[in-house]
Amino acid sequence: MFKSIGGLGNISSILSNMHNIGPKMKEVTVEMREQRIIATAGDGAVEVIINGIGEMQEIRVGDEARGHAHLEIWIIEATNIAGASAKREYAQAIQRVASEMNLNLPGLDSLLGSLTGGA
């Protein structure tokens, strides 16, 4: 019955930091937008570069891969790998901010895990 009382301090921390959450999340988004994540497929035949929020920045296809039967598969594979990495990095950034702000939010890890597909 009294386990939930321990969360009252957490509520106090959340309320006292409420005005900082928006600017901090904007800061994380700007930081992640500038980050570059690179993934390859087809033994390096295809390279995909996305930013930390999952926006495609660049795709490179090696000359030897142009017209290859697996080119489309390699593009999809590299994009999916990079996207999963971006989700993990963004989740870690959110966890870092929550920790820095002393926001012990119950279920945050579970929520971020579900958003990243457990990646």
Image (cartoon, helix red, strand yellow):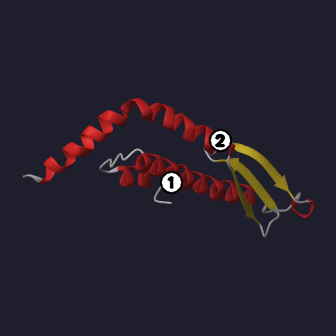
x, y percent for residue 57 = 75, 44
Q: Residue at x 71, y 44 (%)?
A: 56
The quadrant holding residue 81 is bottom right
What residue lies at 85% left-to-right and 56% top-to-bottom?
A: 61
For the question of whether residue 2 can be seen, the reply is: yes
Name the residue carrying label 1.
Answer: 92
Residue 48, image quadrant: bottom right
The tag earlier along the polypeptide, 2 or 1, is: 2
Q: Point out which mark residue 33 bears.
A: 2
Residue 65 image label: none
The kind of secondary structure element at disc 1 is: helix
Relative to 22, 18 lies left or right: left
Task: Tell me residue 74's x, y (percent).
Answer: 74, 60
> For this view, does 115 lie left or right of residue 110?
right
Q: Is residue 68 left or right of residue 57?
A: right
Which percent across, then down, holds residue 79? Answer: 68, 54
Considering every residue shown, the one lying at the far bottom of the view is 43
- In the picture as drawn, the residue positioned furthest to the left comes out as 1
Rendered view: 69 above or below 60:
below
